[in-house]
Image: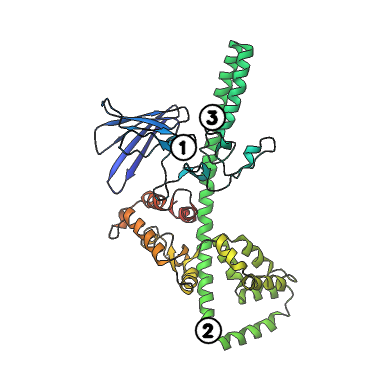
Amino acid sequence: MFGEGTLLTYNKKTSVYTLHAYANGMHVARKTTAESNYYYYHEDATGSVRLVMKGTQANPWFRTDYLPFGRTFNTTTANPEDFKFLDTRPTKVSGLLPFGERFYDADSGRFLTGDSVLGSLSSPSSNNRWAYCVNDPVNRVDLAGQWPSFQDVCNFVGSLADDAVNLLGDAAQALADTAVEVARIGRFAVQTALDVGQRMLDDIKQAAYSVADAVVSGLVAVKEAWDNLDPGLKQWIINGVAFAVSFIPIAGPLISCIIDGTFVDMFSAIMTGNWAMVGMCALAFVPGAGKLAKVGLKSFEKVGIKSLEKSVAKFKPYKILSKEASKEGKEAHHLLEKRLAERLGITDSGTIPSVALTRAEHQKITNELRKEIAYGTDYSTLSNAEIRNAYASVYGEGSDWFKAIEHYFV
């Protein structure tokens, strides 16, 4: 939910702009360029949309009620409405509600992932990290996906202020009003600082990704050239170089790791977020520990821990994953399609994060993306924001797939 002001959205399929108006933290109205009517929103105490009126019509355009955890019931109108529980629009593919850090399922009353904020022993209910608002949705809301939320803190402060008012009368009321105003000003200052910090972090991340893409692209090319050599010649080179570098006290382990592919494996693990593999590869560069670490890397494959790596590291550069996927009878899917990657200035599509899918899964995702941005579109006319919104619509805002490519749109 927004505080004060307006929000303008654009639907590429229908070429329709929609302007939303907000006041005092509430969604009050919207209007589209497709018609002249205004739509007026009526929300309850939690911020959920209960009633929508169209223009000057006497009958409701949309009306519904909610169960405590957000499931709709007693909907008495057939007209569609995107904004419902807590004035939040669900994702197009899954229907889940994007609440800040996590996705929420109103049918089960649970988040899909655990809360990053740990609970307290003094409040046993808070130790269920998947529960919504410590199972008290009537009196609390959690739009940030973290508990306690700012709203919960405000509610607690407000309850203390109410007690003070009952005891001290008008003087305490004036003091409480001042405290609330100071809290609002403080929140605005903190939010402004966070926004500035986030922009700086995005710039740093973009630069880091660009450098990492270039490094991985070069290393992959070297590794492919090495893999294509005759096996006998490769073994002869390895034996000769290993014998030569064994006499170098410090450089020996480093050169050995570059030769046997550990260096390339480490950069691939960094790009895919497989930090367990990164640590193991890094240990291989340490004199004395190098041989033990490499034995550990081999053991990953022998005892089946390789499957655990795949479940943790979901993404790999396309150049690497395409070969692995074909061996498993699957297809590598560019999380950012090549046709749109070229529009964003990405010349080497082999470095784009990818996932292994079955043919049916791959076709389903491709069809959804085609609905957002059709083949044959003049891609040069698309803005970064339009491409970003298309992928956010298909993958879901805040999903792991979307986060893996979000930096390309900055």
Q: How is the image coloured?
A: rainbow
Task: State the CA–CA distance, disc 2 to disc 3.
Answer: 68 Å
In primary-sequence order, the first of circles 1 and 3 is 1
Q: Nearer the viewer, mark 2 or mark 3?
A: 3
Q: How busy is the neighbourhood of tag 3: few (under 14 within 10 Å), some, or many (20 plus)?
A: few
**Secondary element at image label 1:** loop
As drawn, 407 above or below 315? above
Residue identified by numbered label 1:
70
Residue identified by numbered label 2:
229
Q: How far from the left and from the top, in percent, is residue 372?
A: 33, 53
Q: In this orientation, which residue lies closer to the viewer: 296 or 136?
A: 136
Task: State the CA–CA distance, disc 1 to disc 2.
Answer: 61 Å
Amino acid of disc 3: Asn
Q: How far from the left and from the top, in percent, is residue 195?
A: 51, 40
Amino acid of disc 1: Gly
Amino acid of disc 2: Leu
Whether residue 3 is visible here, answered yes or no, is yes
Q: How busy is the neighbourhood of tag 2: few (under 14 within 10 Å), some, or many (20 plus)?
A: few
Residue found 55% across the figure and 64% down from its top: 310
**Secondary element at image label 2:** loop
Q: In this orientation, which residue lies closer to the viewer: 386 or 390?
A: 390
Residue found 44% across the figure and 38% down from its top: 71
Residue found 48% across the figure and 73% down from its top: 323
In primary-sequence order, the first of circles 1 and 2 is 1
As drawn, 184 above or below 268? above
Q: Which mark is residue 111?
A: none
Residue identified by numbered label 3:
139
Extreme-front residue of the structure: 74
Q: How busy is the neighbourhood of tag 1: few (under 14 within 10 Å), some, or many (20 plus)?
A: many
Whether residue 1 is visible here, answered yes or no, is no
Q: Nearer the viewer, mark 1 or mark 2?
A: 1
Task: State the CA–CA distance, disc 1 to disc 3.
Answer: 13 Å
